[in-house]
């Protein structure tokens, strides 16, 4: 006799996903691998979208994230993006839990950046610049602090009130954080530049990057979007989370088209980094760049951690 799936809200999901444990869970998932088809994207009326992101690990775990994107919701006072994760028993297909998908997405995205940074950022990297002030940007400090000795955080946002709000939240959480007006100066002073924006045009310039900087690009999830310019990509040793970035990420698609980046110059993926198939950072002066678009394998790992502890 089947039981009803557990309902796990945002607060319980957040509590079950502390960043150190989540980073470790993602590493284990990328080492083990999973069947992860390309996300299903369906167009709905008035520019809305329905996305389905399934993944499974043999009979060990099975799940799917359901995402709806309704751009017009702002006028209704509602969030544009809503998501829910359904975790199933990989052996029987029974539905185990319905989990807050927004919290899973935000936390696994930040944790994936930190996981890549474990291999790519300098071991002594302590100055973090967060570009953006939204949901995912707000999780970056906690994620990076799980893998690097972060002692100083600067927040820049296209609208200063957003940067001030996030900096104040981080201060309450115990971080040494401040908002900045000068993006160029903030980039030049940072060891890690972590971007989580919806920018359509490059924000971070290669000319601003010091030797030894690690650039983490989380936004720009469509081919038309950019967070870093061609010079930044040209100067850096480039890594991606999965091959999906080759088709979906403007920070990869556009440099490939312009010739600023060659396909065989992409040094590796999170799979190859976690499995030790490629070398991460090679020295203290190398500039590294990681571009993520997100993967259902990360959602499955996070959901399994929420339910399994």
Image (cartoon, grey):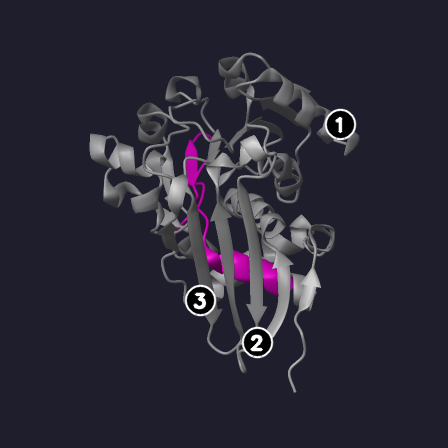
- Residue at the spot 68% in from the left edge and 24% down from the top edge: 165
Residue ID at (42%, 47%) = 49
Q: What is the magenta range?
A: 278-305
Is residue 48 highlighted in magenta?
A: no
Element under label 3?
loop
Q: Which residue is mark 1?
A: 171
Mark 3 and mark 1 in contact (Cβ < 8 Å)?
no
Of helix, strand and loop, which one carries label 1?
A: helix
Using the numbered discs, state the Cα–Cα distance from disc 2 to disc 1 in whole angstroms: 41 Å
* Residue 128 placement (x, y as % from top left): 59, 29
Q: Looking at this rendering, what residue extends furthest in the bottom direction?
A: 1
Number of the label disc, if any, that sits on residue 34: 3
Which element carries disc 2, helix, strand or loop?
loop
Q: Who comes first in sequence, dot 2 or dot 3?
A: 3
Ranked by sequence position, the earlier of labels 2 and 1 is: 2
Foreground of the two, 119 or 239? 239
Image quarter where the N terminus lies is bottom right
Q: Quarter of the image containing the C terminus?
A: bottom right
State whether residue 262 appears in this view: yes
Q: Which mark is residue 89?
A: 2
Mark 3 Cα shell of 10 Å, populated few (<14), some (14-19), many (≥20) = some
- Nearer-the-camera pick, 84 or 92: 84
């Amino acid at each position: 006799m089947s039981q009803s799936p557990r309902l796990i809200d945002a607060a319980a999901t957040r509590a079950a996903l502390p960043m150190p444990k989540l980073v470790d869970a993602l590493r284990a998932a990328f080492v083990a691998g999973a069947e992860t088809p390309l996300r299903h994207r369906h167009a709905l009326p008035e520019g809305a979208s329905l996305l389905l992101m399934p993944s499974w690990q043999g009979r060990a775990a099975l799940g799917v994230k359901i995402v709806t994107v309704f751009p017009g919701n702002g006028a209704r006072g509602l969030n544009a993006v809503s998501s829910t994760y359904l975790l199933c028993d990989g052996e029987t297909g029974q539905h185990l839990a319905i989990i807050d998908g927004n919290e899973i997405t935000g936390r696994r995205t930040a944790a994936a950046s930190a996981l890549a940074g474990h291999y790519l950022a300098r071991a002594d990297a302590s100055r973090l610049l967060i570009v953006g002030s939204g949901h995912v940007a707000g999780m970056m400090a906690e994620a990076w602090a799980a893998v690097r000795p972060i002692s100083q955080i600067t927040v820049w946002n296209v609208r200063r009130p957003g940067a001030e709000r996030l900096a104040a939240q981080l201060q309450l959480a115990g971080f040494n954080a401040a908002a900045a007006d000068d993006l160029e100066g903030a980039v030049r002073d940072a060891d890690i530049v972590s971007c989580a924006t919806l920018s359509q045009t490059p924000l971070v310039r290669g000319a601003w990057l010091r030797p030894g900087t690690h650039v983490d690009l989380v936004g720009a999830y469509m081919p038309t979007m950019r967070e870093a310019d061609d010079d930044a990509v040209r100067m850096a040793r480039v890594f991606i989370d999965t091959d999906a970035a080759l088709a979906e990420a403007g920070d990869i698609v556009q440099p490939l088209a312009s010739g600023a980046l060659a396909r065989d110059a992409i040094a590796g993926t999170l799979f190859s980094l976690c499995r030790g198939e490629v070398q991460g950072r090679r020295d203290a002066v190398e500039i590294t760049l990681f571009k993520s678009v997100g993967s259902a394998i990360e959602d499955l790992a996070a959901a399994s951690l929420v339910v399994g502890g």
